[in-house]
Amino acid sequence: MKNNQEKWVNEVVESMKGSQRAKPAPELLGKITHQLFDQKAKVLSIRQWRIIAIAATLILALNILAISQLSSNNKAVNTQMAEKNSGQQDIISNYKLYE
Amino acid sequence: MSREYQILKSIANGDETAFRELYVQFSERVYNTALSYAQNVEDAEEITQDVFTKIFRSADKFKGKSKVNTWIYRITVNTALNHLKSKKRLSFIQFGGEIKQQIDFEHPGVLLENKEKAKALFKVIKTLPESQKTAFILSFIEELPRQEVANVMKTSLKAVESLLQRAKANLRKKLQKQYPKK
């Protein structure tokens, strides 16, 4: 039994011996030469489009994150400014001696 | 200067006829190797297209330090491995690490009596580490001499032999595990 299995495994490992080479589709050469010699604009494959879409989504998400952080920072600065201004108003009103 | 080297020089000058000649000479080797890695026709064609585009764009960089055949095999192996990596990354993004069920690959050139065995072989080849996979594909599917495999992989003959021993041992172990009733 074990010998049979070993024999089978060896046959599997050697199973591509004497096989023929697979041939590419005849239209592939035309596709490649068209891309290299005829076409001015680069044609993107679906895979490249997917990668571009993922990259664009990432950039968009990062931008949204940056804008939201910036606006929350602005709010904080505005509050601080408002507090500061009200403090100055107090001082100014304190110097209005003849009112 | 070899005829292939002359063809590459002409390709570097933008000669389309020379490019077609090189394609006729090497496309089967490139496609067959790509098919062994990708195990599907669409990906193998995409890899072949990438390889010939790279050959066209870097023909002027070929200095004749290695054989043209070795250089083209090296480009093919690197392109195929990169293709597999990016496909893995993409499927991880799309399916969140879930393994997609794939149909067993059937090599179109295999002898009829070896069809089932070759199917089992390709199923386990996929699981080999990169360098073992390359050594095995170039030696046992492309049937390149060991020294040529070493040249393609930029390593020593001894290292290739050791990689092949480990690849065979791994394949045997995996085949026995996956097909215990054979």
Image (cartoon, rainbow, N blue to C red):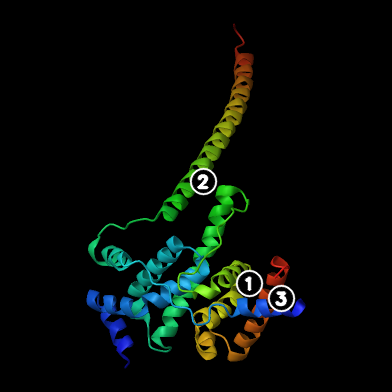
Evaluate if marks 2 and 3 touch, with contact meaning CB atoms under 8 Å apart. Answer: no
Residue position for label 2: A58
Q: Mark 1, chain letter?
A: B
Q: Amino acid at mark 2?
A: Leu
Question: Who is closer to the viewer here, A73 or B169?
Answer: B169
Distance from the alpha carbon under mark 1 to that under mark 2: 32 Å
Residue A6 percent location from the top left of the image: 71, 79
Residue found at the very far right of the displayed protein: A2
- Do we see residue B153 in this rendering? no
Query: Quick one: quadrant of the N terminus of chain B?
Result: bottom left
For marks 1 and 2, give the one nearer the viewer: 1
Q: Quadrant of residue B21 in the image?
A: bottom left
Residue B140 percent location from the top left of the image: 55, 81
Local packing at callout 3 (Cα closer than 10 Å; few below 14, some 14-19, many 20+) is: some
Q: Amino acid at mark 3?
A: Gln
Question: Who is closer to the viewer here, B98 or B105?
Answer: B105
Q: Residue at x 42, y 79 (%)?
A: B72
Which element type, helix, strand or loop, lies under badge 2?
helix
Residue B120 numbered tag? none
Question: Who is closer to the viewer here, A12 or B41?
Answer: A12
Q: Mark 3, chain letter?
A: A
Residue position for label 3: A5
Determine whether B65 is above or below B26 in the image.
below
Local packing at callout 1 (Cα closer than 10 Å; few below 14, some 14-19, many 20+) is: few
Residue A26 percent location from the top left of the image: 31, 67
Residue B129 numbered tag? 1
Q: Residue at x 53, y 78 (%)?
A: A16
Q: Residue at x 68, y 71 (%)?
A: B175
Q: Mark 2, chain letter?
A: A
